[in-house]
Image (cartoon, rainbow, N blue to C red):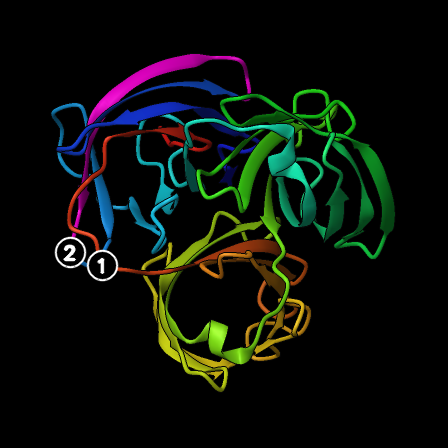
């Protein structure tokens, strides 16, 4: 998902990563073009991922991180190639499982979406319940205050690819191998592109589920774009947090405050943003939230993905479905 001069834009496809981090990827962009790329992912012992395309140098702005369960990888980057230099983007990789069925969709899912392009700034969030055979219903809230009652049918292939004409005619998502997250992209009729992240809700949560080190990746859309933010925060069992975040313009900001989580897994924080609302997946390793800036560039919408980190020092051979890869 891109924001800034290169938006509206999304890219999705399939990426195969070998034991040594080398990869090949075939992608389709929102404008219908396709490309084949190869390169190498490099991962540090603390889980920070960088990339080099082809035989080139390491991309100086790409940085990603897998979650502790190693089924999701999130990254941010700034384009510096010949097209729309300065564009910010968010990338989400989901590791594929061996097989999926309609039963894997059953449950309550928390949705967070962000748009880019003529329909932005805009976010969507709320709760959807999916039955075992695919019908879903729920209530979603838009950033402009509109509340939507939604219903339809989700279809999932045995490879974990999810489609739904009731969401959008070109909506396509993929489920991670842990089956608690799926991520999709689509385009509205006016050309607006959006990313949608669905987290399966667990049964019970407490403040202790927040405790640990989390890597944050955020993307903004609207008047404050292009902009991304990323970095690490440590959350204590009482919800207090501190860390350092880096913005796409190079600024580094020490941050601190407090985060609250309800027994249902809904997360709020007045020190992040007054309307910030996030949710935690049932495996308690992924948090996704949306909010709207009320100070600098008011009205800018953004999405934040937090992954609980764990040590890792090797790449893994396994197909990854790549939702977003930059130029």
| Magenta residues, dominant SS class | strand
Mark 2 highlights which residue?
A: 45
The reply to whether residue 169 is visible in this rendering is: yes
Of the numbered discs in the image, which one, if any, rests on residue 259? none
**Closer to the camera in the image, 313 or 81:** 313
The image position of residue 246, as x and y in percent, is: 34, 63
Instruction: Say above or below: 233 vs 98.
Output: below
Magenta part of the chain = 30-44
Along the horizontal axis of the image, is 22 left or right of 156? Answer: left
Residue at 61% x, 59% y is 202
The image position of residue 188, as x and y in percent, is: 71, 28
Within 10 Å of disc 2 (Cα), the crowding (few <14, some 14-19, many 20+) is: few
Residue at 86% x, 46% y is 148
Element class at badge 2:
loop
Q: How many marks?
A: 2
The image position of residue 131, as x and y in percent, is: 76, 38
As for residue 32 lying within the magenta part, the answer is: yes
**Closer to the camera in the image, 203 or 151:** 203
Q: Measure the C-alpha gap from mark 1 to mark 2.
A: 6 Å
Instruction: Say above or below: 261 vs 177.
Output: below
Along the horizontal axis of the image, is 137 left or right of 190? Answer: right
Of the numbered discs in the image, which one, if any, rests on residue 311? 1
Whether label 1 touches label 2, CB < 8 Å? yes
Within 10 Å of disc 1 (Cα), the crowding (few <14, some 14-19, many 20+) is: few
């Amino acid at each position: 998902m891109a924001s800034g001069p290169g938006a509206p834009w999304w890219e999705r496809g399939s990426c195969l990563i070998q034991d040594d981090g080398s990869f090949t990827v075939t992608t389709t962009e929102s404008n219908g073009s396709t490309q084949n790329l190869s390169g190498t992912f490099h991962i540090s012992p603390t889980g920070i991922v960088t990339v080099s395309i082809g035989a080139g140098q390491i991309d100086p702005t790409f940085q990603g991180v897998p979650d502790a369960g190693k089924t999701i990888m999130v990254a941010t980057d700034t384009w510096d190639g010949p097209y729309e230099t300065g564009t910010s983007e968010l990338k989400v990789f989901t590791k594929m499982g061996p097989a999926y069925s309609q039963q894997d969709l059953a449950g309550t899912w928390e949705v967070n979406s962000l748009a880019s392009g003529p329909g932005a700034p805009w976010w969507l969030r709320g709760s959807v319940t999916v039955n075992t055979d695919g019908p879903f219903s729920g209530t979603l809230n838009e950033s402009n205050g509109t509340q939507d009652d939604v219903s339809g049918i989700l279809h999932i292939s045995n490879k974990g690819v999810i489609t739904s004409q009731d969401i959008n005619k070109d909506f396509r998502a993929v489920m991670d191998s842990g089956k608690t997250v799926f991520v999709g992209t689509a385009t509205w009729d006016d050309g607006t592109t959006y990313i949608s992240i669905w987290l399966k809700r667990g049964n019970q949560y407490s403040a202790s589920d927040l405790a640990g080190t989390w890597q944050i990746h955020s993307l903004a859309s609207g008047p404050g774009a292009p902009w991304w933010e990323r970095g690490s925060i440590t959350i204590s069992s009482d919800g207090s947090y501190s860390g350092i975040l880096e913005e796409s313009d190079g600024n580094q900001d020490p941050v601190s405050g407090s985060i609250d989580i309800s027994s249902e897994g809904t997360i709020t924080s007045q020190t992040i943003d007054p309307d910030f609302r996030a949710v935690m997946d049932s495996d308690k390793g992924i948090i996704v939230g949306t909010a709207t800036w009320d100070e600098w560039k008011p009205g800018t919408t953004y999405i934040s993905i937090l992954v609980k980190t764990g040590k890792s020092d090797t790449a893994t051979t396994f197909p990854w479905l790549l939702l977003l890869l930059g130029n």
